[in-house]
Image (cartoon, rainbow, N blue to C red):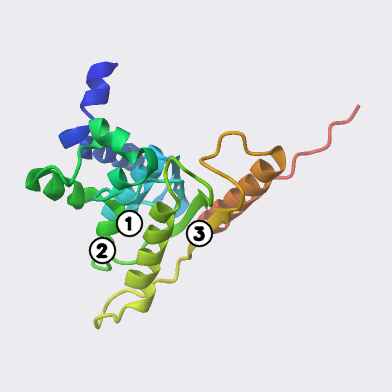
Amino acid sequence: GERWHKDGSLMKKQNVFDDFQGCAEFLVSSGYTSPERLAIEGGSNGGLLVGACLNQRPDLFSCGVAHVGVMDMLKFQRFTIGHAWKTDFGCAEESDEWFDYLSKYSPLHNITREKGQYPAVMVLTGDHDDRVVPLHSLKYIAELQHQLIHAPSSSGECEQTNPLIARVETRAGHGAGKPTKKVIEECADVYGFVAACTQAQWQVQPEVQE
């Protein structure tokens, strides 16, 4: 209900990430899966969820797939319809308090090697997305690659070997109205990526005897 929604917005946004990570921990502790087999996926606001959780608990997941995610929480309000989200996220330009809070979980601004190797990451965006503009996904994946692969590492730091990739759909927007052909191709790429990262075995459906 509305109380639940408000408890996961504005200055309580971290509750969303804590709850999600708690669900993952339950699945692991209950024996349903393991971090090596656990993939997470989300889009738009859910892409923000994926990015934040990968930053905060890279040890908990095998891979993350973020579709058209809101990754820059300090500047989202400057682009297209982003200003309308301030009622849910707040705004870093309105006070030091908001800047400090948003900067603590903004996916783009919390990538670090200090927690070891990151899970495999695939971000997806459309080159004509006018809701969550492509710069969110592109800046996030570029910063991941810079911080985890290209930046000089300190002695003893874990080398990043899991893939960090972006899939950019051309002549496409935020997702709605995408032709069936593009949907099938995207699903195939995502499922193939997740299967490879989690070492999942494809199951061949037995033929039905008439």
Q: Position of residue 209 (x, y in %)?
A: 88, 30
At label 1, the amino acid type is Asp
Secondary structure category for the residue under label 2: loop
- For disc 2, the neighbor class at 10 Å (few under 14, some 14 to 19, many from 20) is some
- Specify which label sits upstream in the sequence, 1 or 3: 1
**Circle 1 residue:** 59
From the image, tell me which residue sits under label 2: 115
Q: Quadrant of the N terminus?
A: top left
Task: Give the Cα distance between marks 2 and 3.
Answer: 22 Å
Residue at 22% across, 18% down = 3
Rendered-image quadrant of the C terminus:
top right
Q: Verify CB contact (< 8 Å) between mark 2 and mark 1.
A: yes
- Quarter of the image for residue 180 reads top right
Residue at the right extreme of this rendering: 210
**Horizontal arrangement in the rendering, residue 65 relative to residue 87 (left or right):** right
Residue at left offset 59%, top offset 45%: 172
Amino acid under disc 3: Ala
Q: Amino acid at mark 2?
A: Lys
Real-space CA distance between mark 2 and mark 1, rounded to the nearest whole angstrom: 8 Å
Q: Are marks 1 and 3 in contact (CB under 8 Å)?
A: no
Please state if 207 lies on the left or on the right of 31 as rendered: right
* Residue 120 quadrant: bottom left
Q: Nearer the viewer, residue 100 or 202?
A: 100
Alpha-carbon neighbours of circle 3 within 10 Å: few (<14), some, or many (≥20)? some
* Residue pointed to by mark 3: 166
